[in-house]
Amino acid sequence: MSTAPADSVAVLGAGRAPAEWMPFATAQTSLGGSDVTVVQAVHDSWELRIVRVDVEGISPGVRFTAPALPAADPEALWVTELHQGVDLCAGRGTDAEEHSEVRMMVPWDGEVTLVDAPAQQMMPQVTVHDIPGGYPVIIAVRRGPDPPPVPQVDEGQIGEDGKPIRLRRTGSLIPEIEIAPDGDGGHDVSVRWPDKVREVVAVPGR
Protein backbone atom coordinates (compact mmCIF):
# COMPACT_ATOMS: atom_id res chain seq x y z
CA MET A 1 0.00 0.00 0.00
CA SER A 2 1.32 3.44 -0.90
CA THR A 3 1.93 5.92 1.88
CA ALA A 4 1.42 9.67 2.18
CA PRO A 5 3.48 12.17 4.18
CA ALA A 6 2.09 13.17 7.58
CA ASP A 7 1.09 16.77 8.38
CA SER A 8 0.83 17.64 4.68
CA VAL A 9 -1.62 18.82 2.03
CA ALA A 10 -2.04 17.92 -1.64
CA VAL A 11 -4.11 19.24 -4.52
CA LEU A 12 -5.94 16.46 -6.34
CA GLY A 13 -5.41 15.90 -10.05
CA ALA A 14 -6.59 13.37 -12.61
CA GLY A 15 -8.55 10.51 -11.12
CA ARG A 16 -8.71 12.37 -7.79
CA ALA A 17 -5.14 11.29 -7.06
CA PRO A 18 -2.76 13.72 -5.29
CA ALA A 19 -0.92 15.79 -7.91
CA GLU A 20 1.68 17.14 -5.48
CA TRP A 21 2.25 17.16 -1.69
CA MET A 22 3.70 19.90 0.51
CA PRO A 23 4.27 20.10 4.28
CA PHE A 24 1.46 22.08 5.89
CA ALA A 25 2.65 25.66 6.51
CA THR A 26 1.24 29.13 5.86
CA ALA A 27 2.03 30.18 2.28
CA GLN A 28 0.67 31.45 -1.02
CA THR A 29 2.18 29.16 -3.61
CA SER A 30 1.55 26.83 -6.55
CA LEU A 31 0.77 23.18 -5.83
CA GLY A 32 0.06 20.55 -8.45
CA GLY A 33 -0.30 23.24 -11.09
CA SER A 34 -2.87 25.29 -9.11
CA ASP A 35 -2.43 28.47 -7.08
CA VAL A 36 -3.23 27.81 -3.43
CA THR A 37 -3.44 29.82 -0.23
CA VAL A 38 -2.50 27.83 2.87
CA VAL A 39 -3.03 29.16 6.41
CA GLN A 40 -2.15 27.53 9.72
CA ALA A 41 -3.53 28.76 13.05
CA VAL A 42 -2.45 27.17 16.35
CA HIS A 43 -4.05 27.59 19.77
CA ASP A 44 -3.10 25.38 22.71
CA SER A 45 -3.36 21.75 21.52
CA TRP A 46 -5.61 22.54 18.55
CA GLU A 47 -4.63 23.65 15.06
CA LEU A 48 -6.75 24.92 12.17
CA ARG A 49 -5.49 23.99 8.71
CA ILE A 50 -7.03 26.08 5.94
CA VAL A 51 -6.54 25.64 2.19
CA ARG A 52 -8.09 27.69 -0.59
CA VAL A 53 -7.55 26.63 -4.21
CA ASP A 54 -7.39 29.91 -6.14
CA VAL A 55 -8.79 28.79 -9.49
CA GLU A 56 -11.86 29.56 -11.59
CA GLY A 57 -14.62 26.98 -11.59
CA ILE A 58 -14.44 23.70 -9.70
CA SER A 59 -11.22 22.20 -8.33
CA PRO A 60 -10.91 18.37 -8.20
CA GLY A 61 -10.19 18.74 -4.49
CA VAL A 62 -7.56 18.61 -1.76
CA ARG A 63 -6.21 16.02 0.66
CA PHE A 64 -4.96 16.68 4.20
CA THR A 65 -3.02 14.39 6.51
CA ALA A 66 -2.85 14.68 10.29
CA PRO A 67 -0.04 13.79 12.71
CA ALA A 68 1.04 10.13 12.50
CA LEU A 69 1.19 7.50 15.23
CA PRO A 70 3.46 4.42 15.38
CA ALA A 71 1.63 1.42 13.92
CA ALA A 72 4.08 -1.37 14.70
CA ASP A 73 1.32 -3.07 16.67
CA PRO A 74 -1.93 -2.30 14.82
CA GLU A 75 -3.90 -4.26 17.40
CA ALA A 76 -3.10 -1.57 19.96
CA LEU A 77 -4.44 1.19 17.69
CA TRP A 78 -8.02 2.29 18.25
CA VAL A 79 -10.10 4.43 15.92
CA THR A 80 -13.22 6.48 16.66
CA GLU A 81 -15.50 7.94 14.00
CA LEU A 82 -18.17 10.50 14.86
CA HIS A 83 -20.86 12.58 13.19
CA GLN A 84 -21.45 10.62 9.99
CA GLY A 85 -17.80 10.01 9.28
CA VAL A 86 -16.52 13.60 9.14
CA ASP A 87 -14.52 13.26 12.36
CA LEU A 88 -11.90 10.66 13.18
CA CYS A 89 -9.51 9.95 16.05
CA ALA A 90 -6.73 7.37 16.10
CA GLY A 91 -5.12 6.48 19.40
CA ARG A 92 -3.09 3.91 21.28
CA GLY A 93 -4.07 1.98 24.39
CA THR A 94 -6.39 3.86 26.72
CA ASP A 95 -8.16 7.12 25.93
CA ALA A 96 -5.60 9.00 28.03
CA GLU A 97 -2.65 7.99 25.83
CA GLU A 98 -1.23 9.46 22.62
CA HIS A 99 -3.71 9.97 19.83
CA SER A 100 -4.14 11.92 16.59
CA GLU A 101 -7.46 13.64 15.93
CA VAL A 102 -8.82 15.29 12.78
CA ARG A 103 -12.17 16.96 12.20
CA MET A 104 -13.66 18.35 9.01
CA MET A 105 -15.05 21.77 9.94
CA VAL A 106 -17.16 22.32 6.80
CA PRO A 107 -19.31 19.43 5.47
CA TRP A 108 -17.93 19.20 1.96
CA ASP A 109 -18.20 16.13 -0.25
CA GLY A 110 -15.33 14.23 1.31
CA GLU A 111 -14.23 11.47 3.59
CA VAL A 112 -12.09 10.91 6.68
CA THR A 113 -10.05 7.71 6.78
CA LEU A 114 -7.09 6.08 8.54
CA VAL A 115 -4.14 5.49 6.21
CA ASP A 116 -0.53 4.32 6.21
CA ALA A 117 2.26 6.84 6.80
CA PRO A 118 6.02 6.41 6.29
CA ALA A 119 8.15 4.55 8.86
CA GLN A 120 5.41 2.08 9.80
CA GLN A 121 3.03 4.70 11.10
CA MET A 122 -0.66 5.45 10.59
CA MET A 123 -2.60 8.72 10.53
CA PRO A 124 -6.05 10.20 9.90
CA GLN A 125 -6.56 11.65 6.42
CA VAL A 126 -9.21 13.97 4.95
CA THR A 127 -10.03 14.01 1.24
CA VAL A 128 -12.41 16.69 -0.05
CA HIS A 129 -13.75 16.51 -3.61
CA ASP A 130 -15.10 19.06 -6.11
CA ILE A 131 -14.40 22.33 -4.32
CA PRO A 132 -15.63 25.67 -5.71
CA GLY A 133 -12.49 27.63 -6.63
CA GLY A 134 -11.72 30.47 -4.25
CA TYR A 135 -13.48 29.01 -1.19
CA PRO A 136 -11.53 27.75 1.85
CA VAL A 137 -11.57 24.19 3.13
CA ILE A 138 -10.88 23.89 6.87
CA ILE A 139 -9.97 21.01 9.14
CA ALA A 140 -8.98 20.97 12.81
CA VAL A 141 -6.26 18.64 14.08
CA ARG A 142 -4.94 17.79 17.52
CA ARG A 143 -2.26 15.41 18.77
CA GLY A 144 -1.66 14.46 22.38
CA PRO A 145 -3.49 12.77 25.25
CA ASP A 146 -7.25 12.65 24.93
CA PRO A 147 -8.73 15.53 26.99
CA PRO A 148 -11.21 14.76 29.77
CA PRO A 149 -14.81 14.57 28.56
CA VAL A 150 -16.85 17.74 28.91
CA PRO A 151 -20.43 17.26 30.20
CA GLN A 152 -22.95 18.77 27.80
CA VAL A 153 -26.69 19.23 28.16
CA ASP A 154 -29.18 19.19 25.28
CA GLU A 155 -32.56 20.76 26.09
CA GLY A 156 -33.86 20.68 22.51
CA GLN A 157 -36.73 18.28 23.26
CA ILE A 158 -39.90 19.02 25.24
CA GLY A 159 -41.57 16.43 27.48
CA GLU A 160 -45.29 15.80 27.97
CA ASP A 161 -45.30 18.19 30.91
CA GLY A 162 -44.06 20.99 28.64
CA LYS A 163 -40.66 21.14 30.31
CA PRO A 164 -37.33 20.58 28.48
CA ILE A 165 -35.93 17.04 28.52
CA ARG A 166 -32.33 17.31 29.68
CA LEU A 167 -30.20 14.90 27.66
CA ARG A 168 -26.68 14.64 29.07
CA ARG A 169 -23.75 13.44 27.00
CA THR A 170 -19.98 13.79 27.16
CA GLY A 171 -17.37 14.63 24.57
CA SER A 172 -14.32 16.81 24.07
CA LEU A 173 -14.93 20.36 22.88
CA ILE A 174 -13.77 21.32 19.39
CA PRO A 175 -13.16 24.68 17.68
CA GLU A 176 -16.20 26.48 16.24
CA ILE A 177 -15.81 28.55 13.07
CA GLU A 178 -17.60 31.04 10.83
CA ILE A 179 -16.33 32.07 7.38
CA ALA A 180 -16.93 35.48 5.80
CA PRO A 181 -15.45 37.45 2.86
CA ASP A 182 -13.00 40.12 4.00
CA GLY A 183 -13.97 42.58 1.25
CA ASP A 184 -10.56 42.35 -0.41
CA GLY A 185 -10.77 39.02 -2.21
CA GLY A 186 -9.91 36.94 0.85
CA HIS A 187 -11.72 35.50 3.86
CA ASP A 188 -11.91 36.02 7.60
CA VAL A 189 -12.37 32.87 9.65
CA SER A 190 -13.79 33.62 13.10
CA VAL A 191 -12.74 30.92 15.56
CA ARG A 192 -14.04 30.14 19.03
CA TRP A 193 -11.46 27.80 20.54
CA PRO A 194 -12.49 25.17 23.11
CA ASP A 195 -11.23 27.37 26.00
CA LYS A 196 -13.66 30.09 24.74
CA VAL A 197 -10.88 32.34 23.39
CA ARG A 198 -11.99 34.02 20.15
CA GLU A 199 -9.73 34.81 17.21
CA VAL A 200 -10.07 35.95 13.60
CA VAL A 201 -7.79 34.11 11.19
CA ALA A 202 -7.10 35.96 7.92
CA VAL A 203 -6.98 34.02 4.66
CA PRO A 204 -5.59 36.71 2.30
CA GLY A 205 -6.78 37.19 -1.26
CA ARG A 206 -4.57 36.96 -4.29
Image (tube, grey):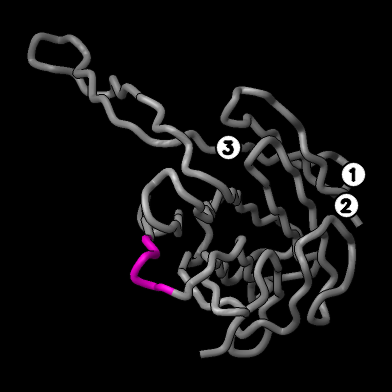
What secondary structure is found at the residue carrying circle 1?
loop
Task: Assess whether mark 1 and mark 2 are in contact (beta carbons under 8 angstroms).
Answer: yes
Relative vertical location of residue 29 with respect to residue 175 in this rendering, above or below = below
Foreground label between 3 and 2: 3
- Is 182 magenta? The answer is no
Total numbered circles: 3
Q: Quadrant of the C terminus?
A: bottom right
Relative vertical location of residue 165 with respect to residue 96 in this rendering, above or below = above
How far, Cα to Cα, is label 1 from label 3? 25 Å
What secondary structure is found at the residue carrying circle 3?
loop
Q: Position of residue 127 (x, y in %)?
A: 56, 69
- Tag of residue 184: 1
Task: Identify the residue shown where x is 81% and y is 59%.
Answer: 25
Q: Which residue is mark 2?
A: 205
Mark positioned earlier in the residue sequence (3 or 2)? 3
Task: Identify the residue shown where x is 63% and y is 37%.
Answer: 178
What secondary structure is found at the residue carrying circle 2?
loop
Foreground label between 1 and 3: 3
Task: Assess whether mark 3 and mark 1 are in contact (beta carbons under 8 angstroms).
Answer: no
Q: Which residue is mark 3?
A: 175
Q: Residues within 10 Å of mark 2 (few under 14, many from 20)?
A: some
Task: Quadrant for residue 59, please give it.
Answer: bottom right
- For badge 1, the amino acid type reads Asp
How far, Cα to Cα, is label 3 from label 2? 24 Å
Could you say which is closer to the camera, residue 196 or residue 77? Answer: 77
Task: Identify the residue shown where x is 55% and y is 79%.
Answer: 120
How far, Cα to Cα, is label 2 from label 1? 6 Å
Could you say which is closer to the camera, residue 182 or residue 125? Answer: 125
Residues rendered magenta in the picture: 73-78
Could you say which is closer to the camera, residue 103 or residue 55? Answer: 103
Q: Residues within 10 Å of mark 3 (few under 14, many from 20)?
A: many
- For badge 2, the amino acid type reads Gly
